[in-house]
Amino acid sequence: SQTIHQWPATLVQPVGSPLSLECTVEGTSNPNLYWYRQAAGRGLQLLFYSVGIGQISSEVPQNLSASRPQDRQFILSSKKLLLSDSGFYLCAWSVSGIRYTQYFGPGTRLTVL
Amino acid sequence: AQKVTQAQTEISVVEKEDVTLDCVYETRDTTYYLFWYKQPPSGELVFLIRRNSFDEQNEISGRYSWNFQKSTSSFNFTITASQVVDSAVYFCALSEAGQGAQKLVFGQGTRLTINP
């Protein structure tokens, strides 16, 4: 069966510091991978998605970037965090294609102070 | 642009009551998918159901049921005989086709509290 991992689970970072969140999927090959952010009390917003190694599509221009160095690894990064980057970050995976269900990881709660 | 509206921000009921969560969507696509996810206090989104635009049959899974009506662009979710464990935030979502990937557009969520 497939499993999706995210780490760290929680993170507190000062403004201006770098960020690296990692997501890995087990039990599947060539998945579609997604990063979402959930701001406090709000819905989820798609940030990035990837259909293959090195292929990243950005949905919202912002202070963040994503990379996919390996087939089942998806990384969310920032060079300098802003207060507005605080939120709950969720990674998701799906079978390759547009018709399949996305399954979400446990999430990373980021607080920028 | 696609949009999902969950007008009910919060709902609070007493255990064993039935409760319906509303979801209204907007899309110009003829082929699309609708989803419901549950977010318990732990934060992880749990998949509940997926419906494609060609299948308007209602679905029942235990105490959960879903009513999909294309004529009103609605995909409502009913919990029968609610239990305290049903307390969570529930999200309705609509898929949009990207470059070989599916992009989910979420509603703002409905916080459901079941009181003992």
Image: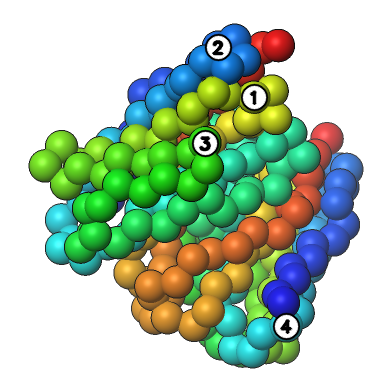
* Residue type at numbered disc 4: Gly
Residue B83: mark:
1
Question: Which residue is labeled 2 in the image?
Answer: B13
* Residue type at numbered disc 3: Arg
Residue A27: mark:
4
Q: Earlier in the sequence, mark 3 or mark 1?
A: 3
Q: At 73% across and 83% down in the image, what residue appears?
A: A27
Q: Position of residue A58 (x, y in %)?
A: 49, 67
Name of the residue lying farthest toward the left: B71
Which of discs 3 and 2 lies nearer the camera? The answer is 3
Q: At 72% across and 42% down in the image, what residue appears?
A: B43
Which of discs 3 and 4 lies nearer the camera? The answer is 3
- Write down the chain letter for disc 1: B
Q: Nearer the viewer, residue B50 or A13?
A: B50
* Quarter of the C terminus of chain A within the rendering: top right
What secondary structure is found at the residue carrying circle 2?
strand
From mark 3 to mark 1, how far is it between C-alphas? 10 Å
Question: Which residue is labeled 3 in the image?
Answer: B63
